[in-house]
């Protein structure tokens, strides 16, 4: 909801008093939802002159909060407690940093609100109407499975955001008209900010959330028993981008190689001693020299897989950063059963030149054969791994998959592109 007062009118999270407006709702939360009540203890609750919203770990309650019925006050307070516990402000800031100008703040807040509301409705909470729901949003999007057995298990805020922000007719600036109309009918306005200074602390909040949900399950009321498995819980795993960065830097690092054009320092010393003593010269020992070749990195996109355009964009951005720092030569290939597209990747704009044809089968052999002739230093394959693997090559291989695979590949490093 739009703010009615300036941000400077808020009480300081350090010196301000605990919210008077939310006192009754928070006091009754323990009986209604023990899990939310436990998580609320880790949040900062303050009153201000704007509308009710969350920033980091602080919840600001506006004057309109007191006009709601008691069940709606409890539901709205629970809504914002989950925003804090699920680290939505930190995740929004992280996503904005990754996507830059392409990031759509309003759509991320819409996705976060929809996931939180879906969880609260499953836990029997009352919410101020009209409330946005993840199920209704997924039903609006073309090409998605709208009959998923459990949306709260299969979806999370980041995945829903990417689905909502998918380019419309190739234009990333456009938003699906059905989503725009939905926001208008629900009178939706963002209630999530990430302008404060705070740490992500995903591992800390993941532990708190798991403990709180277990408490709720024991009590048998609220979101605890409803959320046996919740996909939007904070994830303390290392982001796949950081994992990829380490693997790429390792693969393109300048490792000295044996060179028979220069002798080893030890051989020079032994040969000098042998010559002075009139003894036979020792066997030649090659020395180390820098590899003068530019590393060749190949990104091979399995166009028959479920790798999304957004994942490809993020992946290419990481690799382009490594190319700039290492002066590596970067190539982007498209393949299914054949290698059907090749382009030199100098900038993110080169992605538009790749002829991507969806559907068909998968065969890794043409890519591996071309890499062998191409003298590649590293091959990165974006794929579902739904095909037999060829023999292991001499160069390094990184397998990037959009979803978990039943068995890891026999060789190479595996990266799961989630979150």
Image (spheres, helix red, strand yellow):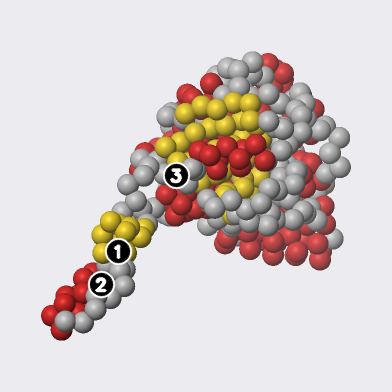
Q: Can residue 336 be seen in this view?
A: yes
Indicate whether 183 appears above or below 314: above
> Where's residue 347, x and y in %?
43, 28
Label number found at residue 340: none
Nearer-the-camera pick, 270 or 175: 270
Residue 189 in sight from this viewpoint = no
Going from the N terminus, do you reach mark 1 or mark 3 first?
A: 3
Give the foreground label among 2 and 3. Answer: 2
Disc nearer the start of the sequence (2/3): 3
* Residue that extends furthest to the left in the rendered view of this protein: 276
Residue visible at 79% across and 41% down in the picture = 151
Residue 196 - label = 3
Residue contact between numbered discs 2 and 1, judged by CB atoms under 8 Å: yes
Q: How far apart are marks 1 and 3 (CA)?
A: 55 Å
Q: How far apart are marks 2 and 3 (CA)?
A: 62 Å
Check disc 2 and report its element: helix, strand or loop.
Answer: helix
Give the labeled residue for mark 2.
267
Label 2 and label 1: CA atoms lie apart by 9 Å
Residue 37, percent across and down? 68, 58
Q: Earlier in the sequence, mark 2 or mark 1?
A: 2
Indicate the secondary structure of the residue bearing disc 3. loop
Q: Mark 1 points at which residue?
A: 287
Q: Which of 317 and 159 is in front in this view?
A: 317
């Amino acid at each position: 909801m739009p703010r009615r007062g300036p941000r400077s009118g808020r009480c300081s999270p350090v010196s301000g008093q605990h919210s008077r407006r939310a006192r009754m709702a928070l006091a009754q939360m323990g009986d209604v939802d023990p899990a939310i009540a436990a998580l609320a203890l880790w949040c900062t609750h303050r009153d201000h002159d704007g509308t009710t919203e969350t920033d980091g770990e602080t919840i600001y309650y506006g004057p309109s909060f007191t006009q709601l019925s008691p069940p709606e006050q409890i539901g709205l307070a629970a809504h914002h407690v989950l925003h804090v516990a699920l680290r939505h402000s930190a995740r929004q800031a992280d996503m904005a940093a990754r996507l830059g100008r392409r990031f759509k703040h309003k759509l991320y807040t819409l996705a976060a609100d929809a996931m939180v509301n879906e969880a609260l409705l499953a836990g029997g909470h009352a919410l101020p109407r009209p409330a946005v729901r993840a199920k209704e949003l997924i039903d609006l999007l073309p090409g998605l499975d709208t009959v998923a057995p459990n949306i709260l298990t299969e979806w999370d805020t980041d995945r829903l955001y990417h689905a909502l922000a998918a380019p419309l007719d190739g234009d990333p600036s456009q938003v699906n008209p059905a989503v725009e109309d939905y926001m208008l009918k629900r009178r939706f306005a963002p209630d999530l900010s990430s302008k404060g200074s705070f740490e992500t602390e995903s591992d800390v909040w993941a532990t708190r959330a798991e403990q709180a949900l277990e408490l709720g399950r024991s009590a048998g009321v609220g979101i605890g028993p409803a959320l046996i498995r919740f996909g939007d819980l904070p994830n303390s795993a290392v982001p796949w981008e950081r994992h990829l960065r380490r693997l790429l830097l390792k693969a393109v690092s300048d490792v000295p190689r044996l060179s028979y054009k220069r002798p080893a320092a030890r051989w020079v010393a032994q040969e000098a001693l042998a010559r002075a003593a009139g003894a036979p010269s020792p066997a030649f020992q090659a020395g180390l020299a820098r590899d003068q070749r530019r590393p060749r990195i190949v990104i091979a996109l399995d166009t028959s897989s479920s790798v999304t355009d957004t994942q490809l964009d993020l992946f290419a951005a990481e690799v382009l950063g490594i190319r700039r720092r290492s002066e590596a030569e970067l190539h982007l290939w498209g393949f299914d059963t054949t290698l059907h597209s090749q382009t030199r990747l100098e900038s993110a704009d080169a992605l538009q030149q790749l002829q991507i044809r969806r559907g068909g089968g998968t065969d890794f052999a043409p890519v591996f054969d071309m890499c062998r002739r191409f003298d590649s230093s590293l091959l990165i394959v974006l794929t579902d791994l739904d095909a037999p693997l060829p023999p292991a090559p001499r160069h390094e291989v990184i397998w990037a998959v959009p979803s978990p695979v039943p068995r890891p590949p026999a060789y190479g490093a595996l990266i799961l592109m989630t979150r």
